[in-house]
Amino acid sequence: MKKPKVTPINKEVFLKEEDFIVSKTDLKSRILYGNRIFIKISGYQEKELLGKPHNILRHPDMPRCAFKILYEHIQNGKEWFGFVKNLRKDGGFYWVFANISPTFNINEQIIGYYSVRRKPIDGFKQIIEPLYMQLKEIEQTEGMEGSLKAVEEFLNEKGMSFNELMIKIQKGIINEL
């Protein structure tokens, strides 16, 4: 299924503290469900989202390695935490702090994914935007392998996992990198 062509514009939409975006996808990340806030903030109508790949919302400012790490986590039965810049239908964008986890059937087989997103902590962009920009630059010169290596080296230097880093940023424990 071809992703619709949306031209990004510099128009940010903000979540409120009480907003929680919820969606469910199948194993191929096709959207099966999105709550009212998800539909509203995306700028799409529900019928335009259901059955579509979740990457319909992928903003070009996001490093590909973030999604590679995400899928390594959830396809291996683990949850993932991270900051995501999403693209709206009108070309605007919104940031979320996401928690994505696999959904299991009674036989403990992964049957899909469940995501809850909320407003990121104030000040997170000071940390995340330069980091993501650096990873995007590495991807342009060294590809996905280079950016994944940079993430691994960075996490080893900090002595924490990807999820630990993201949660600490969201809690305001880490104010700079």
Image (cartoon, rainbow, N blue to C red):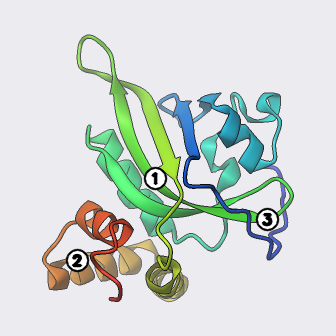
Q: Residues within 10 Å of mark 2 (few under 14, many from 20)?
A: some
Instruction: Assign a secondary structure to mark 2.
Output: helix
Label 2 belongs to which residue? 155
In the picture shown, does residue 24 fall above or below 169?
above
Location of the C terminus (image quadrant): bottom left
Disc 3 + disc 1, Cβ < 8 Å: no
Quadrant in which residue 23 is drawn: top right
User: Is 85 positioned to the left or the right of 143 in the image?
Assistant: right
Location of the N terminus (image quadrant): top right
Under mark 2, the amino acid is Leu
Q: Nearer the viewer, mark 3 or mark 2?
A: 3
| Residue 2 appears in the rendering | no
| Residue at x 44%, y 72% (from the top left corner) | 144
Q: Nearer the viewer, mark 1 or mark 2?
A: 1
Disc 3 + disc 2, Cβ < 8 Å: no
Q: Label 3 to label 1, Cα distance in Å?
A: 19 Å
Under mark 3, the amino acid is Gly
Q: Earlier in the sequence, mark 1 or mark 2?
A: 1
